[in-house]
Image (cartoon, helix red, strand yellow):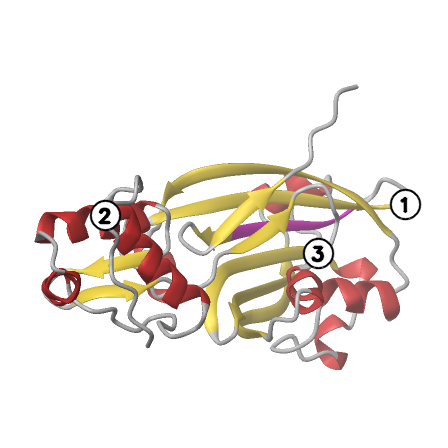
Amino acid sequence: MIEQPLDATSPKPLYEQVKDFILHHIQDGTFKPHTRIPSERELAQRFGVNRLTVTKAIKELEQAGLVYVRIGKGTFVAPETYNLQLDTLMSFTEEMRQRGHEVSSRVLNAAMTEANAESAHRLCVPVGTRVAILRRVRCVNDQPIALETSTLLASACPDLFEHHDFTAESLYAALRTRYKLALAYAEQTLEARAASREEAVLLEMAERAPVLAIQRVTYDDRSRAVEYASSVYRGDRYKFRAVLKNL
């Protein structure tokens, strides 16, 4: 690690120079995700500054989501944050792989059953209609990112679980290729809330930590609702991006 002394004559405050030092080593891979960076005392001694100067630098990095603090253990590099486009109908698997990430899933439930009141309402079918339910923990680079439950019309994909391994395969790819479904558009809502106990356990995060909850209904080219998806994304790992245009 190359040491760069702080410049006391620079117009840039000392805490920002300390912050730049830490940021540089995060970006060049010296400080890797989930590894502990030097302590505040170590950094203060290294650069000959007051510990409060280092504290301010780390606090700003924490607020930016670049590091996280574990009481009694130190400060650690935060994992990469992933951006999800809100203006493109693309599956989680497809989007992450397109960006060069390794994607996997842990299947919690994959079964044919009957639609309850909520899914029946979302899919515009009678309660008790045959549906396929797929519930998965979605992972990127072996890190849990989202908990996703998809409810689909069984008539649109009658033998879905007999031919596909959804620990690795994309659901949307299967719908398009095997069942020739033309997924045309989707309507979705987003809500910020606290994680439930079950969500926290499955996503390996603290209970009541922030999550982004999404409800989405996907339609085919005949405007038939074919999927109702309820997803929960880790608030510290995911950002949603949209391009807004003036009409």
Which residue is denoted by mark 2 in the rendering?
15
In what element is the residue under mark 1?
loop
Residue 230 among those drawn in magenta: yes
Question: Mark 2 near mark 3, Cβ–Cβ under 8 Å?
Answer: no
In depth, the one of 124 and 238 nearer the eye is 238
Residue at image location 24% in from the left, 49% down from the top: 57
Looking at numbered disc 1 in the image, what kind of residue is underneath it? Asp
Residue at image location 90% in from the left, 45% down from the top: 221
Question: Mark 1 near mark 3, Cβ–Cβ under 8 Å?
Answer: no
Q: Residues within 10 Å of mark 1 (few under 14, many from 20)?
A: few
Q: Position of residue 142 (x, y in %)?
A: 48, 76
Q: On the picture, is 118 further left or further right than 213?
A: right
Question: Image quadrant for the C terminus?
Answer: top right
Query: Which disc, if any, is residue 221?
Result: 1
Residue 146 among those drawn in magenta: no
Q: On the picture, is 39 further left or further right than 143?
A: left
Q: On the picture, is 241 further left or further right than 153?
A: left
Calculate the distance from the C-alpha at mark 1 to the C-alpha at mark 2: 56 Å
Q: Earlier in the sequence, mark 2 or mark 3?
A: 2
Residue 126 in sight here? no
Q: Earlier in the sequence, mark 1 or mark 2?
A: 2
Q: Compared with residue 129, is residue 105 higher up or lower down, i.e. above or below?
A: below
**Numbered range of the magenta stretch:** 225-231
Which residue is denoted by mark 3 in the rendering?
152
Q: Earlier in the sequence, mark 1 or mark 3?
A: 3
Looking at numbered disc 3 in the image, what kind of residue is underneath it? Leu
Looking at numbered disc 2 in the image, what kind of residue is underneath it? Tyr
Judged by depth in the image, the label closer to the viewer, 1 or 2, is 2
Residue at image location 69% in from the left, 29% down from the top: 244
Calculate the distance from the C-alpha at mark 1 to the C-alpha at mark 3: 16 Å
Query: Which disc, if any, is residue 36?
Result: none
Q: Quadrant of residue 190?
A: top right
